[in-house]
Amino acid sequence: MASKIERIIARLQKRIAEGQPEEQYEAQQETRLVAARYTKASNWPAAIDILSSVSQALLKAGQGGSGGDLAILLVDVYKQSSTKPDATSKGRLLTCLRLFDSEEPTRKKFIKEMMDWSRKFGDYPAGDPELHHVVGSLYVEKGDAEEAERHLILGTKDSPEVLTRMEYEWYKQDESHTAPIYAARAILPYLLVANVRAANVSYRAFISMLSEENKGLGVQDVSSQGSDVRIFPSLPLLNFLGLLLLAVQKGSPDLFRQLRTKYASNIAELGGAWDQALEMIAEMYFGIQRPRQSNPLFDMMGSLFGGGAPGGAGSRPAARRVEAAPTAEGLD
């Protein structure tokens, strides 16, 4: 026999499926009232169940505003009940997320609240990697490259392939010589969050697509333990990125300085777009100190992500030395 909450949910779901917009709105309001009663009584499972079920029903019915409102309220109940991110709690939110229309205004707020919850109650200070991966992938589908980058950089082991494919498709709309700029939008941020594995995956994926679709490019292979570099005579900055990854593997300050000197004129042509990132990488991986300022990491990363292709000056956050080729927690 169905429980009381199951009967209430079934009735509201039927009302939403069969009703007109006015009735669907009334179902949303009734859900809020019922959920509030359960929340006041600290009956968290019942409040979560009704909010999750009815929000999904409304989103399926095309009522994005009402469904989004309940989905956001569901996250609030998670916070009030100190619910931790696990397969079940994340699954409810991801089901809601996938039901949103990409243009629904409440979706962005729902994503923000969801990530805030995962940061506060989960194990990852930057937010749950699985949530980042799904959100980033949805932004790729929408064609919002910059939002996709922000999430996929903090995603799972599957994120580098998704991110790099997006960067490559974006690059194909630009001039052929800009390939390194788009490759760097994945490689440098991954290095900045101490995910060397993902940086290497992104590099290999990008140059593989580039070589496959541009058979006329002259290529010379250079290999080292854990990394492969292809030298493209016509794309010096792409060569720099590959050799930078080799230098990171070796942890050699002298090699890094040699690269900065050799490619100084090419890097200077970017107008400072990579300077902040390279300064931080120099300190993280090679122990090369730089001027200190107090602004946070993501202000600097914003100079990589903002305004289409990388450009503009960012702030200079402090960095710690990375002793080995690391992988950010939760990204693998």
Image: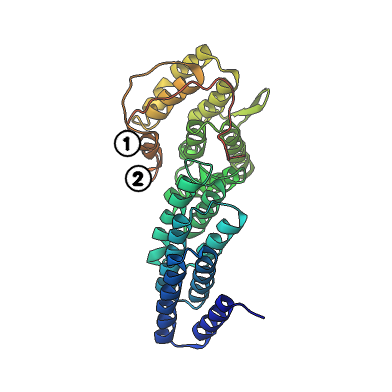
How far apart marks 2 and 1 lie (CA) works out to: 8 Å
Query: From the viewer's perspective, is 164 left or right of 303?
Result: right
Quarter of the image with the N terminus is: bottom right
Above or below residue 8? Residue 64 is above
Residue shown at the point (59%, 25%) measured from the top left: 325
Amino acid under disc 2: Gly
Residue shown at the point (62%, 28%) measured from the top left: 229
Q: In the rendered image, is residue 209 in sight?
A: yes
Residue shown at the point (54%, 27%) measured from the top left: 239
Q: Nearer the viewer, residue 15 or 327?
A: 15
Amino acid under disc 1: Gly
The color scheme shown is: rainbow
Query: From the viewer's perspective, is 320 left or right of 270?
Result: right
Circle 2 residues within 10 Å: few <14, some 14–19, many ≥20? few
Residue shown at the point (52%, 88%) measured from the top left: 18
Residue 312 badge: 1
Q: Nearer the viewer, residue 268 or 288?
A: 288
Query: From the viewer's perspective, is 112 left or right of 330?
Result: left
The answer to the question of whether label 2 and label 1 lie on touching residues, with beta carbons closer than 8 A, is yes
Above or below residue 256? Residue 276 is below
Question: What residue is pinned by disc 2?
Answer: 307
Above or below residue 59? Residue 283 is above
